[in-house]
Structures are given as structure tokens and as C-alpha cells.
Amino acid sequence: MNLNQVTLPVSDMPTATAFYRKMGFLQIVDSPHYARFECPVGGSTFSLSLVEEAFNNGSVIYFEEEKVDELVSRLEAKGFSFEAAPTDKRYLWREAVLRDPSGNKIILYWAGDNRLNPPWRVALSE
């Protein structure tokens, strides 16, 4: 299996789509209640779904970028505000945290080989 996409709930579709386009994602589907974006690198997509009732999304979406510090600087220059600046984590990832206009948590990170092969990776069984 391969992960196709993740869908995030949003409370205001025009504001949400503008936010993700400003981040650099390519919008490939646009409707009043649904939008889909293609990541600038690789073949991944994610989508937004309009939710008209109040919601609390505990999910976190991760976008990987080797030069995460440079990306954060570019986004800050565009007016994005981060909850956490790029920081080295104990699990060997470098992460920065922001939220979209609907409150969805976004982590921009770089893990390199540690994403799939951390020192504590479970041994594969046959």
C-alpha cells in the first residue's frame, strides 16, 4: 500500500486555499467545499474539506524539506507566523511548527535518513 493523501478540515475554504497556495503548494482541485493540492516535490497530495460545524483536529501534517531553516525564513518573509522556530529534536529531526487559518498543526521538518532508518528502528522480521 501507499498513502494517497491526507484531508484536513477547514472552516473557511477561500482563506485556507489562499494560505496553502501562498506556502507554495499547487492547487489542482477547487470547489466550494473541497480543494486538493500537489506538493512541489514528489507525488504527494493533500486536500481540504469544508466543515461547517466547530471542530478540533488533533492531527498533525508533516511536510519534509531538506533546507527547513531557509523555507521558514522565506515563509516568515511572506508573513507566516511560526509557533516554534526550527529546532533539533531528540528523535533526530529538525522541525518548525505553524498552524493554518483553521488551526490545523503543520510541521515543516527534515529528518534525512533518520525518517525511515532511525538508530532505534525495529528489526524487520521475516
Image (cartoon, rainbow, N blue to C red):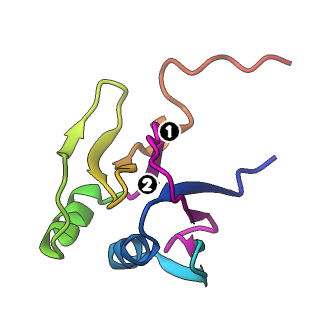
Asked whether 66 or 7 is in front, the reply is 7
Left or right relative to 105: residue 75: left
Which of label 2 and label 1 is nearer to you? 2
Left or right relative to 115: residue 106: left
Q: Where does the image place residue 72, in percent across and percent down from the top left?
A: 22, 61
Q: Is residue 100 magenta?
A: no
Residue that extends furthest to the right in the rendered view of this protein: 126
Question: On the image, numbered disc 1 is attached to which residue?
Answer: 115
What's the magenta region? 36-65
Left or right relative to 36: residue 118: left
Q: Where does the image place residue 16, in percent across and percent down from the top left?
A: 40, 70
- State which tag comes first along the sequence, 2 or 1: 2
Secondary structure under the numbered disc 1 in the rendered image: helix
The residues bearing labels 2 and 1 have C-alpha atoms spaced at a distance of: 10 Å
Tell me if residue 8 comes above or below residue 94 in the rendering.
Answer: below
Quarter of the figure with residue 76:
bottom left
Secondary structure under the numbered disc 2 in the rendered image: strand
Mark 2 and mark 1 residues within 8 Å of each other at the beta carbon: yes
Q: Amino acid at mark 1?
A: Arg
Q: Amino acid at mark 2?
A: Glu
